[in-house]
Amino acid sequence: MKTYARADEVFVDGHGARLTDSTGREFLDMLAGIAVSALGHGHANLAANLRDQVGKIVHLSNLFRHPYTEQVATRLCAQTGMAAAFFTNSGTEAMECALKLARKAMHVRSTPHKTSFVAVEGGFHGRTMGALSLTYSEKYRKPFAPLMDVTWVPHDDIAALERAIAEKQPAAVCYEPIQGEGGIRPLSDAFIRASREICTRTGTVLIHDEVQCGCGRTGTFLAGQQTGVSPDVVVLAKPIAAGLPMGACLASAAFADTFEKGEHGSTFAGGPLACRAALVFLDELERGLLDNVKARGEQLKSGLEAIAKDLPIVREVRGKGLMLGLRLWHSATEFQKALYKAGVITNCTSGDVIRIVPPFVVTMQDVADALRTMRVVLAQFPQQQELATASAKS
Ligand SMILES: Cc1ncc(COP(=O)(O)O)c(C=O)c1O
């Protein structure tokens, strides 16, 4: 189907944060398959574990047990303070689980049942009907109406959140602590803390969508942990199995037993192959990969800030850890294309932001090379003062 605008290159090999196309040209991967490939490409330990598992059992279904689902669930709960996990094959499916969980919890706890949702403007939660309903951008939702009843509140607007909850009596409030598709925009600590307080006071489920910002990408396992806030439900995916399709919906103790047997399910999810990959990812994180995320994140951020100081075309550097955005004074599409031509893979979100979400294994040299190329390419663009002069003249 015509759903994707793909680049022409055919990628055939990779190592760390480097990808090679079919002509032998090397690219620096600062996108990691949209914030996924945490262990980069060609990771020896991941390959060894997957080879071993492929030779044993690839798929079982959730009718039977293998050793790894419970190991991953236990370790995710230990990392997040949650009490139970439901595995999925993607971020949007993990969101569906969270939304169904909130509805089910309210089916039991509220009369009349609370069924609507409150989300934050600019948020992106996936493409299936439930997750799509909460996704802010109208271009994604409009062709598929009618969707669920959702009220969006402006970024960081605590009073609007309080009002929306009072008026709509939603089943849940859901947001990304750092918006990804929305242009790498962190929500303020004050908003996140206030949302916890209001949800607790009003008996509303608080869902954190950490599909993009979670699993260590911002330097802590959950981005929300940096605010000291623990949601009722947290949704993970992208890097969780180092590139294999996997997601998870985790629930706190109060919501762990919301579903009865058969009320939710998946044929493929939590299979042995994806779980082996997740265990390799969690092992690497615990063996010091988070330190690399922090160190390379600081190197990248200070490098981008230095570029921003020298080149007025840059409006803002934002984000945390290895989830960074370079916001320009105009559309970032042309810059993204020029960077790609120069051998650095990124993408453009929210119109004017270059999203930089490299593998967690990115090296000091990779970051230095990426920064050098970005500076050279960006310097070739008309700078902001020149643009301002040009538009004043016209
Ligand atoms: C915050 C967030 N939630 C949900 C999703 C949906 O994940 P998936 O594409 O794996 O369905 C995404 C994907 O970009 C995302 O960034």
Image (cartoon, grey):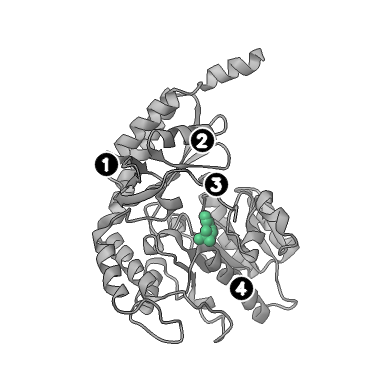
Instruction: Estimate the spatial distance between the alpha carbons at disc 2 and disc 1, rounded to whole Å.
Output: 23 Å
Q: Nearer the viewer, residue 99 or 355?
A: 355
**Label 3 vs label 1, nearer the camera:** 3
Amino acid type, callout 1: Met
Identify the residue under disc 3: 5
Q: Residues within 10 Å of mark 2 (few under 14, many from 20)?
A: many
Query: Where 200 falls versus 7 (above or below)?
Result: below
| Camera-side mark, 3 or 2 | 3
Write the residue at 61% across / 62% down. 131
Q: Which mark is residue 364?
A: 1
Q: Is residue 342 visible?
A: yes
**Few, some or many residues within 10 Å of mark 3 (<14, 14–19, 20+):** few
Q: Quadrant of residue 96?
A: bottom right
In whole angstroms, how far apart are the C-alphas of marks 3 and 4? 32 Å
Quadrant in which the C terminus is drawn = top right
Label 2, on which residue?
A: 327
